[in-house]
Image: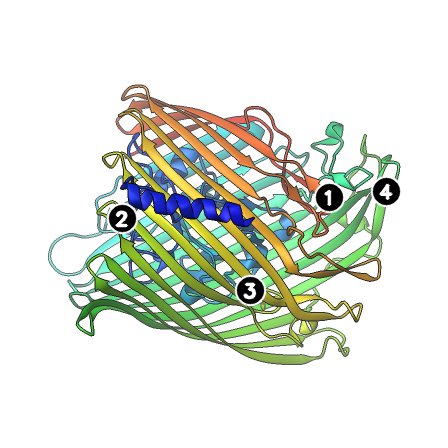
Amino acid sequence: MKSSLLLLPLALVSGIACARATIELPSTTITGIASASRGVDLDVPVSTGSRLGLTSRQNPASVSVANQQQIERVGARHFQEAANSLPGVLAADPPGFGGNIAYRGFSGVQVNQLFNGISLQSSAALRPVDSWIYDRVELIGGPSSFAHGSGSVGGTFNYVTKLATSEDLPGELRLRYGGFDRYELAVGTNQALNSGPGARHYARVDVSHGGSNDFIDRQERTTSNLAFSLLSVLNDQLSHTLALEYLEDQEDSPYWGTPILNPRAGRQRIDRRHRFNNYNVADGRYEQRTRWLRSITDYRLAPGNRLRNTAYHYRGQRDYRNLESYTYLPDNSAINRSAALLQRHDQELNGNRVEWMVDTSLLGLPADWALGADVSRNRQLRFPRSISAVADTVDPNGFSPGSFDDIPGMTRGWVKGRTNLVDNRALFAENRLQVLPSLSVVSALRYDHIDWEVVNHRTVTPTDPARYSRRWDALSGRLGLVWDVTDSVTSYVQYSNSVQPPSGVLTSTSFTGVRDFDLSTGSQWEIGSKFDFWDQRGSATVALYRIVRKDFPIADANNPGETQPVGQQTSDGVELNASLKLTEQLLLEGNVALIDARFDTFNETAGGATISRKGKRPSNTPDRIANLWLTYDLNPQWRTGLDARHVSSVYADNANTRWAPAYTLYSAFVRYRVTDNADVTLRGRNLTDEQYARFISSQYYLGEPRNVDLTLQMRF
């Protein structure tokens, strides 16, 4: 972003502070609405932003939350759709990239994604899960290794599951049916298991099952999700929560994208007549089975003095059987199908995290501390079998998809490839020091010791030895100031840094991906403000940031075929987020993000030559994203709403020679309250039937066309 653009938000921030009008800077998200009430709440603790229990207003960073109200308001069917309601987020789920998120100029493994604060360190494990079992999606912008470990240059997302509570909560039921035979049946309940003196026990169960025929020919998907938790309040000081989640996801003939017409330079085009063709084989398959187990013990040693221990276990198995690549012949008359892949991922993560939170004093000043340690072992065994050659050539006007077993040279059966072992030992500390009644200093420091080992189960070569290991030591942290300008206006400034393993993901990388490389680093300066205005009827945030990522592998300009760890990328940006209750019935919410991401030092090898991409924008990285919601309560029974989402054009390659156009999506809903405990909602999505790419690389990954769904939600 040019210097003049950077100065504009600074002037805006200072003007706001002087004018006493309350505008908030960090990207606090607009939470959803149960009634047309306040949309942004700056005073709710956000666990992903800090272990100190800080609210958004107290945190010197952009922290955003899509809570249950927001998930319901936008009709989010899985956690990625909830994430897309947060400022500056572009989430998609192309099969080969798991749950890909572009945020603040970075994407893929440069953006950390957690499940209940735990990182799986595997991009393939991030496929979106149905939203029913999740309580909220949290986000902290920019480098955040200080809180959650390596791999968070762009930011960190956290998908938080519903847990048993001692509150008296009604049971819930949701039935949904819509376009492309998309259906969902979901039920949840939280119940006290006993009463009277002594230990009290509470159980929560959330179950959902859904599926669809999807808008792509022959693609069918079914999902089943279970979340169970048991809260045992043993006495006034001690409680324990046992949490179990089990997830299943299966797709028949998964959609791997639509081939791009020749010539491939410039705007990427597809043949609209074949928009819904599926070029995968008839028995193509993606399957995932996931099991989570957590044991959470909370012990209140004294007022303001608490100890928490979380033991966790994850087991996941993912299977792929697909023909994944489709390319037009030069005259666009037929399509070559290639890249057959038969693969299994077998992953297991075990760990334990202990945290001590204490309120005390330092140099006579109030100080809050969070101290802890985290130990984990992550093991992944992969069984890859692939053939890159062209399998056949088909006529897009009509073809037989064939069987995976018919692909020349492909045979069934799992053959071990590599086992990757990642042992991580971490120590962390956070502090909030109240220097003055209106000024606090927030700091954090984390040390990670990473041991990595790979075992090769196949032919031993110089570039793939039988066994290889490395270790890294990483230190990350942050330092921020929070100034309460008035009771309604808070401003902040923060510096934070992050570390990231070579090749991004140690659970799948090979010997050559880490052999010569140390950790890459990222750092961020951020300034912002958060505030309420118009007699508390509105809330807003503003954040201005610069992130620099350094020392990642790029092609060696002097030695074609070799790499060197000297890459650098810079991202400047502005995020604004606001909600305003215009009247008692009318709520306006929106956010906008402007991003200027570019390579400072980056080389690629193309056609045997090494080419500099300096000044280019990374692929699948928009330079602006905006969301707008308008909700109107017609009367106590009827509510309606209009939504708009705009995403700018993105490049399909780092050379910036191929691109997909910008798009704007419009949605609307009408909700009728049948009884005090039952609502019916009719929602239309992509009302203008926009044709757009959710993700683009060598193929065009289409978003869904216009469709409607009907939802019945009941409380009992």
Classify mark 4: helix, strand or loop: strand
Q: Name the residue beneath numbered marker 1.
A: 658
Q: Which residue is drawn at 15% across and 52% down?
A: 195
Coordinates of residue 481 in the picture (x, y in percent): 33, 60
Residue 686 spot, x, y in % from top left: 55, 28
* Alpha carbons under labels 4 and 2: distance apart: 59 Å
User: Residue 43, labelled with which disc?
Assistant: 2
- Binning the other alpha carbons within 10 Å of mark 3 as few (below 14), some (14 to 19) or many (20 upward) gives many
Instruction: Tell me residue 443's x, y (percent).
Output: 34, 67
Numbered-mark total: 4
- Tell me which amino acid carries mark 1: Arg
User: In terms of sequence position, does the residue under pointer 1 or pointer 4 come before the other?
Assistant: 4
Q: Quadrant of residue 579?
A: top left
- Closest to the camera, between mark 1 and mark 4, is 1
Q: Give the distance between the C-alpha atoms of the residues marked 1 and 4, in whole angstroms.
A: 25 Å
The reply to whether the C-beta atoms of the residues labelled 1 and 4 are less than 8 Å apart is no
Mark 3–mark 1 Cα distance, whole angstroms, equals 36 Å
Q: Position of residue 650 (x, y in %)?
A: 64, 43
Mark sitting earlier along the chain (2/1) = 2
- Mark toward the start of the polypeptide (4 vs 2): 2
Real-space CA distance between mark 2 and mark 1, rounded to the nearest whole angstrom: 44 Å
Residue type (three-letter) at the residue carrying disc 3: Gln
Mark 3 lies on a secondary structure that is: strand
Which residue is more in the foreground, 397 or 7?
7
Q: Mark 3 points at which residue?
A: 347
- Look at discs 4 and 2 and give the one toward the viewer: 2
Q: Is residue 1 visible?
A: no
Amino acid type at circle 2 is Asp
As drawn, the label of residue 393 is 4
Task: Describe the element under mark 2 as helix, strand or loop.
Answer: loop
